[in-house]
Image: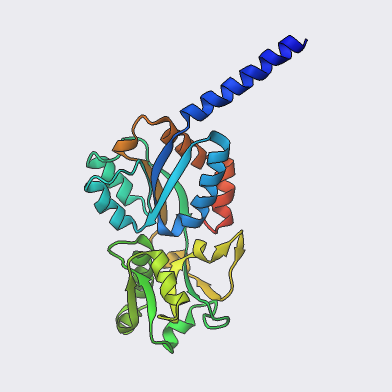
Amino acid sequence: MKHTFRHASLFLVLAGAALLARAEEISVAVAANFTAPMQKIAADFEKATGHKAQLVSGSTGKFYAQIKSGAPFQLLLAADDETPARLIKEGDGVSGSAFTYAIGKLVLWSPKPGFVDDKGEVLKAGRFEHLSVANPKLAPYGLAAMEALKALNLADALQPKVVLAESISQAQQFVTSGNAELGFIAYSQIHKDGRIIDGSYWLVPARLYGPIRQDAVILAQGKGNAAVEALTAYLKSPAAAAVIRSYGYDR
């Protein structure tokens, strides 16, 4: 019996060693708005599989340019569905690998309680100096913000107050630092551990901007990589879906 037990123990040790030997580190480009939930998902993924996802966050537009210039990313989690489709068409993404991992929501936010009302009337009143918006040419949430302003017939009137940020995370930084009194950011950015952070916000009605479908795509450098395929499968799992929803996304 002891002999059998020792053999079983040895098998488990060897199996664990083999798993660790196969564990890989992969490079993942993550849309700035999805940084916080992806950090949680990546940590859970590493515990479950042994694979480590090295995350780099930024604007989808900049990632596109970097990928076209040969950046060594293996997986892209974009803030839109157009960029992954474009990369596949141009041969930089793996055909058939794109899927929607989250559907984003736009909010107008200020760290000051009571500053932003729940109908967005603060925009019409205009009693502020600066409005932070991610560059619409680089960030899908910035494009959604400009679409909302146009739908409200406020784009021209507020243009002098708009401060453009390189990414949605920088748009939030401008507001947090006081360089802008309020700004358009992702709903997920005002969530922490499943709860809304301090301040005031207006959840912008979805009818005012185009759907923010956030797609992931395996890039050419990640083709055939078992760890990359494992992460894409994990992103589709109920465990990942629960994290994604806790940060204010639809799924």
Residue 205 or residue 64, whichever sits in front = 64
Residue 143 visible somewhere in the drawing: yes
The residue sitting at 57% across, 43% down in the picture is 44
Q: Could you say where residue 106 lies in the image, as x and y percent from the top left?
A: 45, 65
Q: Quadrant of residue 171?
A: bottom left
* Count of numbered labels shown in the rendering: 0
Q: Could you say where residue 70 lies in the image, as x and y percent from the top left?
A: 24, 45
Q: Could you say where residue 32 lies in the image, as x and y percent from the top left?
A: 41, 58
Q: Quadrant of residue 180?
A: bottom left
Residue 58 lies, with reference to residue 129, above or below; the image says: above
The residue sitting at 47% across, 34% down in the picture is 230
Residue 180 lies, with reference to residue 144, above or below; the image says: below
Q: Is residue 149 left or right of residue 40?
A: left
Q: In this view, does 10 lie to the left or right of 158?
A: right
Q: In which quarter of the image is residue 209?
A: bottom left
Which residue is most to the right? 1
Residue 226 or residue 17, whichever sits in front = 17
Q: Could you say where residue 104 lies in the image, as x and y percent from the top left?
A: 46, 58
Q: Which colour scheme is used?
A: rainbow
Residue 250 visible somewhere in the drawing: no
The residue sitting at 26% across, 41% down in the picture is 92
Residue 5 or residue 238, whichever sits in front = 5
**Quarter of the figure that contains the N terminus:** top right
